Image: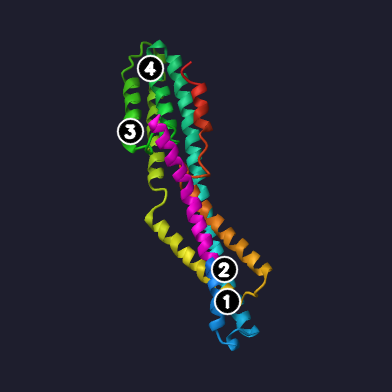
Amino acid sequence: MNNIRRSDRKRKIDILKPILISLIVFACLFGAALVGRAFRSFIPDSHLGEESRSFVITLGVEIAGVIAAFVLALLVAGAQSSFRDQRSEIIEMSAKIVFLDEILANYGPETKEARVLLRRSVVNTIDEFWLRYSTHPAELEQGATKAQVLYDKILLLSPNTESQRLLKEKALDISFNLEQLWDLLILQQVRSIPVTFLIVMGLMVFWFICIFFSLGIYAPSNSTVIFVLVLAALSVAIAFFMIIDLNLPFEGVLRMPSAPITEVLDNIGH
């Protein structure tokens, strides 16, 4: 029970991480626009004329904004692609597990222990990747151990017929592929947000702060403009939220669905 409570607390903290970061980004951008408006009073009126406004907004802010938006879109697309790839790997893993169970069932009653071990491995996979009962993320060593035990259990089978020999070879091949998929998922989880990526994200935030600061200097003082600045800052913050959350597929709000592999439990071990 204590483990479940700790897991729930960790889950809530993991959900709050991208939300908190996106709120900080929103505060920084909208705050930069307000600072720009306050800084406007220190700028000579000759620098705030229509000619200066047209040059700064058109040649400066718009060009920088387009490039920043393009880079931000690439980051979102990259995060989405990574999320989609990991989902495909989970679906592939689920299909291989069902297929492996069918092969073991066709082999004969000698594979009962291997099938029980396979089902237990699926339960452990759900617990560790989706943190239902465990208090820490999946570890590479644990995954390799489970897959190796299953592989060794299948390797110990002694086929009596040619059909059983072919089924054993196929089962060994699938179990080996499952081990590779397990390790790949865990390695992707470990490198979800590398330091270089965080540096790029920080530079992007600074980039947008400069843009919103410039907008604040030349923005008219009315409620409509303030509302538009809020929407613009919120849009950028949501984009950062998506980038961070999609790079944490087993932890964030946009969490990887466990349906493909939980459905496996209804189709194996019978």
**What residue appears at the point 63 percent right and 67 percent down from the top-left corner?**
226
Under circle 3, the secondary element is: helix
**Residue 21 shows up from this direction:** yes
- Upstream in sequence: badge 3 or badge 4: 3
**Alpha carbon separation for disc pair 4 and 2:** 64 Å
**Residue 244 shows up from this direction:** no
For disc 4, the marked residue is: 165
For disc 3, the marked residue is: 142
Q: Depth-wise, is mark 1 or mark 4 nearer the camera?
A: 1
- Residue at the bottom extreme? 46
**Alpha carbon separation for disc pair 1 and 3:** 56 Å
For disc 1, the marked residue is: 217
Q: Quadrant of residue 152?
A: top left
Image coordinates of residue 124 in percent, x first then y, are: 40, 29
- Upstream in sequence: badge 2 or badge 3: 2
14 is within the stretch colored magenta: yes
| Magenta stretch bounds | 1-30
* Residue type marked 1: Ile
